[in-house]
């Protein structure tokens, strides 16, 4: 047995969220106390350094010596090649990352997103009206948390929201790249790339006021992007702005509906919903332990020596439950202030879509609570069936009455 195989054989697996839960896995509490930077193995057997404390995660996310590997080539495998080099924004670094991010970031500022807010509110109203017409009981997953993030993203990008069922499967495969064979990931990337390229071409031909059409119409010397850059932006948005938000919104609604007093309070005091949104982002993991970085040189994290080429996994879901960073860290406190959660990362790769996600959650909650009086679960939440086959933990159904 070679050294690498021996290491994989003795390392414990990366902790999984408990059944019927979005996470954060309870095992991280013990790691924060006794092994805040420790070795583990990914589902495919590759070793990784798990980083679980808030301050260490915060530093790791912003450390320029830790970079995102190219998803199509990591972990390295013999005999598997991907000829296309389209990267997501997360995989771009240096000047290329600064150039592409600089072109798209202005569209995500709170001021620019104000122009999109009436359209987002109309989408939420339409979906809620459909639930009302069908009458209780209704399923908030099928009727709201699945379609709403997709329609918001499509409105933002300026693309048609229909025909995304097959694409969703490919997106989820890529988001699970550390858990599935590389060949499956490469096939999903191919499919995503083809779909994104078709969307970019349609926007370039048809114009419109969406982000893709605006970027396609902007000359390069004025900050516009070329075709392959636009494909990268589209893939990034489909991955980070669609399936992850579907997952989080469903799990967040379970957290709220388990607290009927809080639901009543937020209905009566909608001005407190933005604070609840921030706490939902901290308390309910947007993703579970899938941020993988690779060291470009030797460095220290939390007193442990990381060697060049080794993989590091800063676990945001664990950092957001660190009692050294948050009082009563495992409690849900919608009035928590300050709330220094790390759900959108930190440093050059800080998620530019954070304000869009916040707006989506806020408007979705405002609309549901206003239009569905006495919103409550139709069955005990502990009986809900969850998607247990993915790090995107979410309820498969959420039946409610109102």
Image (cartoon, helix red, strand yellow):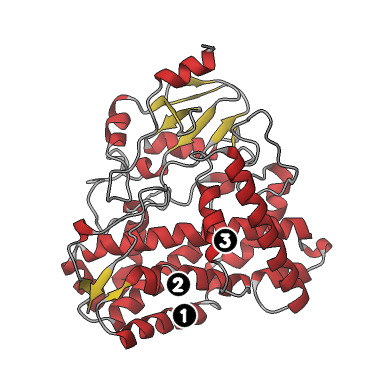
Residue at the disc numbered 2: 148
Give the residue drawn at x 20%, y 67%.
Answer: 262
Residue at the disc numbered 3: 167
* Front tag of 3 and 1: 3
Q: Is residue 232 visible?
A: yes
Give the residue drawn at x 47%, y 17%.
Answer: 7
Q: Which mark is residue 390?
A: none
Marks 1 and 2 sit apart, C-alpha to C-alpha, by 7 Å
* Residue 267 occupies quadrant: bottom left
Residue 334: percent from the left, percent from the top? 27, 60
> Disc 3 or 1, which lies upstream in sequence?
1
Element on which disc 3 rests? helix
Judged left or right of residue 76, residue 202 is: right
Marks 3 and 1 sit apart, C-alpha to C-alpha, by 21 Å
Judged left or right of residue 233, residue 269 is: left
Element on which disc 1 rests? helix
From this view, report whether residue 386 is shown above or below residue 66. below
From this view, report whether residue 345 is shown above or below residue 356. above
Residue 337: percent from the left, percent from the top? 31, 56
Residue 374: percent from the left, percent from the top? 20, 78
Residue 5: percent from the left, percent from the top? 51, 18
| Disc 1 crowd, CA 10 A, few/some/many (<14, 14-19, 20+) | many
* Residue 381 occupies quadrant: bottom left
Give the residue drawn at x 50%, y 35%.
Answer: 60
Q: Which mark is residue 123?
A: 1
């Amino acid at each position: 047995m070679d050294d690498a195989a021996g290491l994989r054989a003795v390392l414990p697996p990366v902790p999984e969220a408990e059944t019927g839960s979005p996470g954060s896995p309870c095992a991280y509490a013990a790691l924060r106390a006794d092994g805040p930077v420790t070795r583990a193995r990914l589902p495919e057997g590759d070793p990784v350094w798990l980083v679980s404390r808030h301050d260490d995660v915060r530093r790791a996310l912003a450390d320029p010596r830790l970079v995102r590997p190219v998803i199509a080539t990591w972990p390295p495998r013999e005999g598997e090649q991907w000829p296309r080099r389209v990267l997501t924004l997360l995989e771009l670094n240096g000047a290329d990352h600064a150039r592409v991010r600089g072109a798209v970031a202005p569209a995500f500022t709170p001021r620019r997103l104000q122009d999109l807010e009436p359209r987002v509110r109309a989408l939420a109203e339409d979906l809620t009206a459909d639930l009302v017409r069908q009458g209780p009981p209704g399923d908030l997953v099928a009727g709201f948390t699945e379609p709403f993030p997709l329609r918001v993203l499509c409105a933002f990008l300026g693309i048609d929201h229909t025909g995304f069922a097959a694409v969703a499967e490919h997106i989820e495969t890529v988001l699970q790249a550390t858990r599935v064979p590389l060949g499956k990931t490469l096939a999903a990337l191919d499919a995503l790339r083809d779909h994104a390229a078709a969307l970019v071409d349609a926007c370039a031909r048809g114009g419109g006021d969406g982000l893709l059409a605006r970027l396609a119409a902007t000359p390069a010397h004025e900050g516009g992007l070329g075709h392959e850059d636009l494909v990268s932006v589209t893939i990034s948005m489909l991955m980070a702005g669609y399936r992850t938000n579907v997952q989080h919104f469903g799990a967040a609604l379970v957290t709220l509906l388990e607290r009927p007093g809080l639901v009543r309070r937020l209905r009566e005091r909608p001005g407190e919903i933005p604070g609840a949104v921030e706490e939902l982002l901290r308390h309910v993991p947007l993703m579970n332990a899938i941020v993988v970085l690779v060291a470009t040189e030797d460095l220290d994290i939390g007193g442990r020596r990381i060697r060049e080429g080794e993989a590091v996994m800063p676990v945001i879901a664990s950092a957001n439950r660190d009692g050294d960073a948050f009082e009563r860290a495992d409690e849900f406190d919608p009035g928590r202030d300050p709330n220094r959660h790390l759900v959108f990362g930190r440093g050059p790769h800080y998620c530019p879509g954070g304000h869009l996600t916040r707006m989506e959650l806020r408007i979705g909650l405002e609309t549901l609570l206003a239009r569905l009086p006495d919103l409550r679960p139709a069955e005990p939440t502990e009986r809900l069936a969850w998607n247990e086959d993915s790090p995107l933990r979410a309820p498969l159904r959420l039946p409610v009455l109102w």
